[in-house]
Image: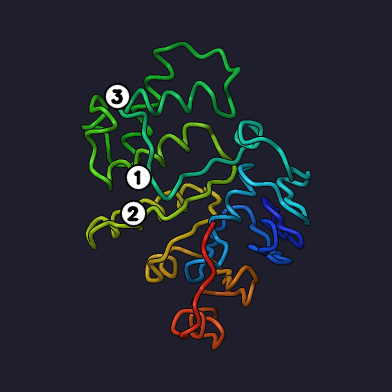
């Protein structure tokens, strides 16, 4: 199976603090791999390194066989990696459709000479995919939290990614909205999308993922199937133990 992403011995230090320490794993084509771990485990920092927002202190990020460590975010995006964020940040005064058009104009196929009508049609299709077709003319600031998170996914998909990074798409949502988020991830999986996912809802990650990678205090403690990882003693200790976690970055 083709390797889409390879993380080799990744370490991140901020001053005297080590946020990630010697983390290695890979993501293959068509897989959904989830990063799990308590607050402070380093999950978001890892996403930030992959997407170019944070520089690694050591190690390599390999995407489609070539190193991208240290690339700026726009270059990472145009290479084929898109991401969402824990806090949804739509352009507040732009409609949902205009938000998605931003991804179409500036993403992987930014130089493509499609006309405005063609891009508008593609934006409408992406909004339909995430269940926001009826909200296409609604300003971003007027969408609910669940709708804003789905808009983030549509905007990321608009960049035509080979790899999609989803960061806490179910955080703060109702049980019904969490189920909608799970259905959305499953629909993307059925379309063959390769996804690296972070979410604290373990029932969601276990439901949609092929593999889990568990982090604790910046180190990988175990990797495997959801059943293997969620029943691993070190994972249970990390979630249920009494030690104070490090601050997430």
Looking at the image, tell me whether mark 3 or mark 2 is earlier in sequence order.
Answer: 3
Q: Which image quadrant for residue 31?
A: bottom right
Classify residue 162 as left or right of residue 206.
Answer: right
- Residue at numbered disc 2: 181
For the point 56% across and 51% down, the residue is: 194
Residues at discs 3 and 2 in contact (Cβ within 8 Å): no
Q: Residue 104, how many percent across, how many down?
A: 48, 25
Image vertical order of residue 187 relative to residue 41, above or below: above
Instruction: Count neighbours of disc 3 (C-alpha within 10 A) and say few if under 14, some if 14 to 19, many if 20 or more.
Output: few
Quadrant location of residue 75? top right
Q: Nearer the viewer, mark 3 or mark 2?
A: 3
Residue 14 lies, with reference to residue 124, above or below; the image says below
From the viewer's side, name the closer residue of 38 and 181: 38
Point out the tag, 3 or 1, that comes first from the N-terminus: 3
Element assignment for label 2: helix
Q: Secondary structure at mark 1?
A: helix
Crowd tier of the residue under label 2, counting other residues whose Cα lies within 10 Å: few below 14, some 14–19, many 20 or above: many
Q: Which residue is mark 1?
A: 149
Label 2 and label 1: CA atoms lie apart by 9 Å
Instruction: Quadrant for the C terminus, please.
Output: bottom right
Q: CA distance from mark 3 to mark 1?
A: 16 Å
Q: Residue at x 25, y 55 (%)?
A: 177
Q: Are marks 2 and 1 in contact (CB under 8 Å)?
A: yes
Left or right of residue 60: residue 35: left
- Circle nearer the viewer, 2 or 1: 1
Which residue is at a point 57% across and 62% down the rendered structure image? 42
Residue 202 on image: x %, y %: 41, 70
Q: CA distance from mark 3 to mark 2?
A: 24 Å
- Which label was assigned to residue 93? 3
Residue 47 image point, x, y percent: 58, 52
Quick one: SS at disc 3?
loop
């Amino acid at each position: 199976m083709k390797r889409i992403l390879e993380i080799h011995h990744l370490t991140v230090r901020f001053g005297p603090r080590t946020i990630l320490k010697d983390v290695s794993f890979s993501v293959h084509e068509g897989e959904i791999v989830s990063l799990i771990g308590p607050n402070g485990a380093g999950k978001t920092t890892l996403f930030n390194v992959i997407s170019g927002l944070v520089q690694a202190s050591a190690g390599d990020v390999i995407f489609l066989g070539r190193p991208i460590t240290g690339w700026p975010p726009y270059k990472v995006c145009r290479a084929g990696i898109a991401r969402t964020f824990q806090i949804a940040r739509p352009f507040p005064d732009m409609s949902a459709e205009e938000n998605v058009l931003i991804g179409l104009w500036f993403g992987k196929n930014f130089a493509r000479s499609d006309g405005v009508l063609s891009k508008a049609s593609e934006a409408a299709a992406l909004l339909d995919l995430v269940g926001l077709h009826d909200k296409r003319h609604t300003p971003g600031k007027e969408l609910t939290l669940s709708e804003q998170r789905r808009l983030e996914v549509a905007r990321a998909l608009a960049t035509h990614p080979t790899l999609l990074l989803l960061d806490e798409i179910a955080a703060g949502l109702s049980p019904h909205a969490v189920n909608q988020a799970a259905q959305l991830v499953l629909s993307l999986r059925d379309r063959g999308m390769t996804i690296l996912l972070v979410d604290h809802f373990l029932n969601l990650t276990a439901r949609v993922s092929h593999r889990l990678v568990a982090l604790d205090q910046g180190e990988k403690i175990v990797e495997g199937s959801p059943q293997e990882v969620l029943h691993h003693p070190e994972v249970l200790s990390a979630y249920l133990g009494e030690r104070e976690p490090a601050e997430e970055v």
